Image (cartoon, rainbow, N blue to C red):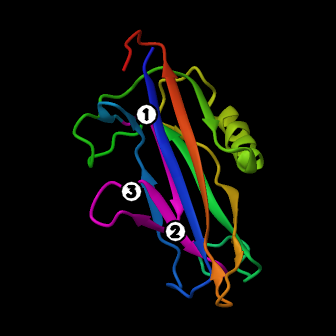
Amino acid sequence: MIRRTAGLLIACAILPCAAIAPAATMVPGGKSGPDCIVELSLAGLGFPSGKLPQGATCYDGDACDMDGVRNGVCAISASICINVQDPRVKKCKVPFTVSHITFSGPKSANLQVSQLQSATSELGMPSSASNCTTAIGVTVPLRGIGKDGIPQPGKLKIEAKAKTQQGKTD
């Protein structure tokens, strides 16, 4: 069974950004690096720049915020994909028969973890097909107003683990 773990980090701020919502596709991976078993596509700008994104950032009220309102919460569009032949990743060896994906995070992220976990039911696992879920809105609240009167960015870190039926371990 292969286990791939990745930290999914989404940041939300209240500064203006681009009018078009870019998407960042994260390729989780275990100790041996990314492998294309699971990819997470998020609206927003990917970071770090120039590398495979490990997170996405969005500004409250911008095009990447699904509700489009400056209300202290970013609702970021997220899709979960399996068995994606990604040309950015040299170790891509798909298809795997993906049997299960689990998400975890801090207690403050229980709602978001539950949303992502529920979305995986669309993938019909176990599956060796290349498939993606319908986009869902994952909410990231701002942390509040700082001493200087400026809204403080919020962030959400969620871990994804995929298991396959190939019998290999990472």
Q: Position of residue 4 (x, y in %)?
A: 44, 30
Q: Which residue is mark 1?
A: 83
Eyeballing the image, is 52 above or below 148? Answer: above
Q: Label 3: how many residues lie within 10 Å, few (<14), some (14-19) or many (20+)?
A: many
96 is within the stretch colored magenta: no
Callout 3–callout 2 Cβ contact below 8 Å? no
Of callouts 1 and 3, the N-terminal one: 3
Tell me the distance, in whole angstroms, between the alpha carbons under discs 3 and 2. Answer: 10 Å
Task: Give the percent coordinates (x, y) of residue 99.
Answer: 56, 20
Question: What residue is at 42 percent from the left and 64 percent from the top?
Answer: 46
- Which residue type carries mark 2? Thr
Magenta-colored span: 36-61
Quadrant placement of the N terminus: top left
Give above or below for 28 relative to 136: above
- Which labelled disc corresponds to residue 53? 3
Taking the image as shown, residue 112 lies to the left or right of residue 163, namely right
The residue carrying pointer 2 sits among few (fewer than 14), some (14 to 19) or many (20 or more) residues within 10 Å by Cα, namely many
Which of 141 and 46 lies nearest the eye of the viewer? 141
Nearer-the-camera pick, 132 or 65: 65
Quadrant position of residue 125 = top right
**Disc number lying in front (1 or 3):** 3
The residue at 42%/23% (across/down) is: 96
